[in-house]
Amino acid sequence: MTLRQREVSTLILLALLGGGLLVAVQQLAAPRIEQQHQAAAERRLLDLLPAGSYDNHPLNQPIALPVGGLLGNPTAEHAYQARLNGQLSAVLLPVTARGYVGPIKLLVAISADGRLLSSKVLQQQETPGLGDKLERQRSPWLQGFDGKSLSDDAASWTLRSEAGEVDQIAGATVTSRAAADALQRALRFFDQQRDYLLKAQQP
């Protein structure tokens, strides 16, 4: 074998070793990367729950939900249980409203006794500066429904423009009405499907 051939052979061997090492590193890192993706997804979805209110990994045990119906979701979605010391602290439900511009997807946290704990917008296309004030970082409007339940007076769910007690987002009456209705529908779905949502995923 000539010097040139030996050099080429050495380069090929090094390339093969480098490729193999890269594959091995990727395989070793894959579980950690997946864990990081899972943690990021949990933070994005579960930041509407108070810190320390759950100690499980809700996304690991999704509960299948029907398309359409009270929740109005156009595609298959999942509910999730948040638990603390084995006890249910919240059920998270996605619900879709029909906004002024397009669909508004909300995530709603409901306590075991059927109270609305909190809610957040996952997706929306509403008018910038008006309907997009549903976003928690833009306005506290949505938080005004925290703590409400189906047993509350109807006026506490109704906009002032419709003789109720809720101040609508200025310039976004349709968006405000759609969001309030979606929150109520989520509570009604929880009330109707309580046994399934609370017991289906218990350990």
Image (cartoon, rainbow, N blue to C red):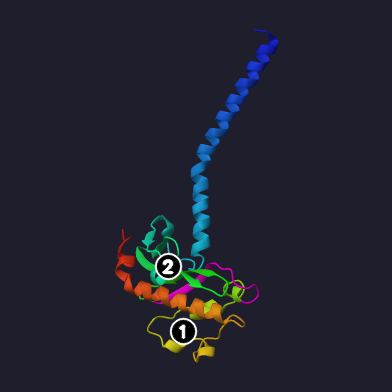
Q: Tell me where residue 12 sits by quadrant.
A: top right
Can I make out residue 112 in this image? no
Element class at badge 2: strand
What kind of element bears circle 1? helix
Is 124 situated above or below 150?
A: above
The quarter of the picture where residue 65 lies is: bottom left
- Number of numbered tags placed on the structure image: 2
| Side of 1 where 38 appears, left or right | left
Q: Mark 1 — residue?
A: 157
Q: Amino acid at mark 2?
A: Leu
Instruction: Find disc 2 in the rendering and name its residue.
Output: 93
Q: For residue 125, which numbered disc appears in the image?
A: none
Q: Which of the two discs, 1 and 2, labels the residue nearer the N terminus?
A: 2
Q: Residue at x 53, y 77 (%)?
A: 142
Q: Residue placed at 42% from the left, 87% from the top?
A: 154
Task: Based on the picture, tell me whether residue 110 belongs to the magenta stretch.
Answer: no
The quadrant of the rendering that contains the C terminus is bottom left
In magenta stretch: residue 124: yes
**Amino acid, disc 1:** Trp
Report the residue that reaches farthest toward the right.
Answer: 4
Q: Is residue 124 above or below residue 38?
A: below
